[in-house]
Image (cartoon, grey):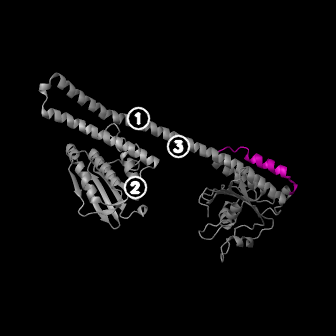
């Protein structure tokens, strides 16, 4: 099926070219026409879009009167990125007439040419010739101009790939196309195919380089953040263990059970934090290489909520937060229990971390054929400009210097929610807290 959503047309002021060029064409040799095309394309570079813009006009000015350029993508979809006619208003009717823009009506003329790679050549063309290219009982769309001669020529590269087609026709120039015109247009199409292929390879190379640059930048950002975040708990562990060692070596009699327990509790918290960081790094690796398998099983979301919140009771108390659960009924669905645990663990951890001593509420409800999971805090909230980016890697809603973490937790949560066919969003007002809402289908399509 063809698309004209991105068709480019020249400005309305281009009215030249409506004169009859028959006399000029009758005296022009094929070599002259080739030179004219070369000159028209001489200033084009390897910029794909600029090359397309120039191509349609160059072909129309050499072949007369109009040219429509069609490209085929890897999925076989046909699009019309550019066209040239001195009267731009006619371009849409040309596109509608020679392609099939309606699903289910079969291939149009242009689609057939691209599929067969054979030129369509009609020195004496009339609208009734479109009938074979429409489905049974369908009346072909008629162009707004009276075309009397038509060619549709495939653009085939040297390695045999068909990039698309050139549709050219005459309606003011009375001289009809002949075999020499067909040979010239096929030469132009071949030349255009080589230029477009080179430009496309250059465009793809630039995009690959851009992605590589972004990947290198992301790697450097990750290494910088990870090294800083890993160094902090390690430094604390070193300080606490050194203090215990010095006291035990020099003044063992001053050590009390409370002092030892205090130091051990501090060490345990840093070990737990390191453990979470390592888990996040492993999760990122699995997600990126696609090695995380989903273990679908019947599980109760209420049970997962109770288990996770129980683990955070001490952390919430240390932060001065009141952690409450509102999940009155069992919520049984087909999910991956480990991923549910991980999703909720990250959301509750963030709520306590950024809630700044406010109450943290975990809510579970059934909403028709979905399970609804909400984690709400009353902290500082998330700035509006950050709410669209907090689910990206290395993004955090606060200054990275003020809070711990790699900036990966919410990205992992989103990836896990997506893998369960769910959605996650956030509602937040600065100074009034944040609410993260996860919606999970009770019977996910991916599990069937």
Q: Position of residue 357 (x, y in %)?
A: 22, 45
Is residue 332 shown to the viewer in this render? yes
Q: Is residue 395 visible?
A: no
Secondary structure of the residue carrying tag 2 is: loop
Which badge, 2 or 1, comes first in the chain's sequence?
A: 1
Is 335 magenta? The answer is no
Q: Residue beneath label 3, please?
A: 211
Dot placed on the residue nearer the N-terminal end, 1 or 3 = 3
Residue 245, x across and y down, in percent: 21, 26
The dot on residue 294 is: 2
Question: Residue 34: within the magenta?
Answer: yes
Q: Nearer the viewer, residue 7 or 397?
A: 397
Q: Quadrant of the C terminus?
A: bottom left
Q: Nearer the viewer, residue 421 or 119?
A: 421
Name the quarter where the N terminus is drawn: bottom right
- Relative image position of residue 443 (x, y in whole percent): 38, 64
Quarter holding residue 65: bottom right
Residue that protrudes farthest toward the top in the picture: 250
Tell which tag, 2 or 3, sits nearer the viewer: 2
Report the side of 36 relative to 417 (left or right).
Answer: right
Name the residue: 71% across, 48% down. Answer: 194
Binning the other alpha carbons within 10 Å of mark 2 as few (below 14), some (14 to 19) or many (20 upward) gives some
Looking at the rendering, the stretch of residues picked out in magenta corresponds to 26-46
Residue bearing mark 1: 224
């Amino acid at each position: 099926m063809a698309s004209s959503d991105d068709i480019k047309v020249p400005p309305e002021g281009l009215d030249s070219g409506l004169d009859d060029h028959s006399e000029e064409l009758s005296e022009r040799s094929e070599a002259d026409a080739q030179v004219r095309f070369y000159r028209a394309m001489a200033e084009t570079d390897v910029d794909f879009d600029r090359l397309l813009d120039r191509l349609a006009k160059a072909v129309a000015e050499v072949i007369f009167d109009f040219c429509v350029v069609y490209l085929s993508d890897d999925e076989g979809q046909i699009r019309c990125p550019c066209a040239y006619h001195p009267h731009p208003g006619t371009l849409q009717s040309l596109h509608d007439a020679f392609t099939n823009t309606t699903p289910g009506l079969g291939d149009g003329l242009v689609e057939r040419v691209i599929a067969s790679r054979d030129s369509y050549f009609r020195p004496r063309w009339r609208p009734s010739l479109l009938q074979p290219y429409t489905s049974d009982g369908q009346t072909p769309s008629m162009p707004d101009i009276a075309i009397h001669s038509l060619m549709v020529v495939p653009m085939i590269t040297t390695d045999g790939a068909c990039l698309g087609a050139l549709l050219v026709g005459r309606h003011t120039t009375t001289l009809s196309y002949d075999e020499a015109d067909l040979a010239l247009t096929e030469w132009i199409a071949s030349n255009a195919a080589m230029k477009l292929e080179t430009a496309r390879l250059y465009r793809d190379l630039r995009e690959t380089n851009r992605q590589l640059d972004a990947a290198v930048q992301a790697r450097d950002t990750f290494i910088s953040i990870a090294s800083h975040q890993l160094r902090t708990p390690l430094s604390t562990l070193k300080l606490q263990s050194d203090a215990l060692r010095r006291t035990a070596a020099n003044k063992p009699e001053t050590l009390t059970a409370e002092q030892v327990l205090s130091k051990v509790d501090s060490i345990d918290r840093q070990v737990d934090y390191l453990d979470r960081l390592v888990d996040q790094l492993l999760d990122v690796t699995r997600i990126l290489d696609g090695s995380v398998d989903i273990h679908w099983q019947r599980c109760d979301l209420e049970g997962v909520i109770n288990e996770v919140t129980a683990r955070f009771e001490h952390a919430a108390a240390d932060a001065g937060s009141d952690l409450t659960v509102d999940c009155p009924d069992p919520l049984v669905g087909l999910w991956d229990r480990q991923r549910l645990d991980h999703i909720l663990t990250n959301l509750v951890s963030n709520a306590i971390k950024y809630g700044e001593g406010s109450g943290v509420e975990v809510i579970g409800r059934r909403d028709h054929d979905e399970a609804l999971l909400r984690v709400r805090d009353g902290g500082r909230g998330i700035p509006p400009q950050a709410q669209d980016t907090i689910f990206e890697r290395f993004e955090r809603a606060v200054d990275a210097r003020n809070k711990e973490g790699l900036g990966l937790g919410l990205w992992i949560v989103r990836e896990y929610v997506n893998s369960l066919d769910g959605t996650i969003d956030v509602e937040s007002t600065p100074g009034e807290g944040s609410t993260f809402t996860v919606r999970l289908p009770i019977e996910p399509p991916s599990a069937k």
